[in-house]
Image: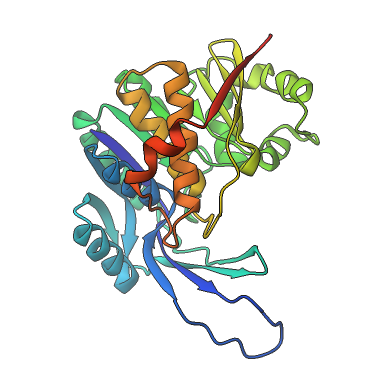
Amino acid sequence: MILAVTMNPSVDISYPIPDFKLNDVNRVEGVCKTAGGKGINVARVVKQMGEAVLATGVLGGTTGNFIVQELTNDRIDNHFLKINQESRNCIAILHHGKQTEILESGPALMPEDGTDSLEKFEILLSAASIVTISGSLPKGLPSEFYRYMSEMCRRKKIPVIVDTSGEPLREVLLHKDKPNAIKPNITELSQLLGIEVDQSLSSLKQVLNSDMFLGVDWIVVSMGGKGAFVKHAGDFFQVTIPEIDAVNPVGSGDATVAGLAVSLNNNVSVDAVLKTAMTTGMLNAMEAKTGHINIAKFKQFYEVVQVKKIDS
């Protein structure tokens, strides 16, 4: 079973407004509201791929109730720590081919909430074969919180994929027990290393050879429409994807993590891991709903993803 962690879940609201106007009234049709947060998007795509998954994390209030109801309607097993605060809303305005996001910060947790979360997490690990930890930390939890979770996974020899940024990611990577996989983008890499990372192959190879990443088996650098640059077990790969008609790119990175988790859980080849992860990311971008894929199109797009090994 894949255990998908979302410590700061949300209700994701997409507003398609082709001619978005500042300081004016904008009327919108086709509003889409879904249970969201990066790990929940992961769980939804894993479920659509036909794999067993359990969504967990922290939520509360009427927003939290909506999230549980949506997951239950989608037949996604879930077991969250309930708190006496309101979970957040995250709004994406889709306009002029662009995406403007308005993200609430969410509830502020108490120290005992963090302790309770780790206790629940350890219990749930007993049934997990791989873990994904995604998204931001809620206020009140220390930046090393994901490091605690990653350590617990490694002690139990359970593979863990961490998809976060900033200090929480730095804390995870500075510890001797590294996660099995991470999925930063170029901006997150630049923020993490304190340098401007460009997209040239030579620059990316140099960056991913940094001591910070030693011990991480899979580093998947997502590059949007250009695909990804990947380091695995000392080898480098350039993954290219076809041009697609993107409808809603929100959650595509999470769908990529879902494809990565399912592939690693099934012990497939390196090429299959990378092609699956890129395919699920593309399929999400082609759907209006966040964290959704049309599995019927999987084989078609899987076949046109190209994986090229780059000389070290």
Q: Is residue 20 above or below residue 205?
A: below
Assign the C terminus to one quadrant of the image: top right
Q: Residue 151 placed where, x, y %?
A: 40, 26
In-front residue for pair 276/242? 242
| Residue nearer the viewer, 11 or 51 | 51
Q: Is residue 133 left or right of residue 78?
A: right
Colour approach in the figure: rainbow
| Residue for point 38% across, 53% down | 292
Q: Position of residue 158 (x, y in %)?
A: 32, 23
Residue 82, image x, y percentages: 27, 59
Please identify the quarter of the rendering in which residue 83 is found. bottom left
Residue 270, placed above or below residue 275: above
The spot of residue 113 in percent (x, y) is 34, 52
In the rendered image, is residue 180 in sight? yes
User: In this orientation, which residue lies closer to the viewer: 149 or 129?
Assistant: 129
* Residue at left offset 42%, top offset 38%: 300
* Vertical relation: 165 (above or below) 27: above
Task: Determine whether, in the image, residue 239 is placed left or right of residue 134.
Answer: right
Which quarter of the picture shows residue 265? Answer: top left
Residue at left offset 29%, top offset 46%: 48
Q: Please count the marks in the image.
A: 0
Q: Is residue 146 visible?
A: no
Rendered residue at 24%/30% (across/down): 128
Image quadrant holding the N terminus, namely: top left
> Residue farthest to the bottom?
25
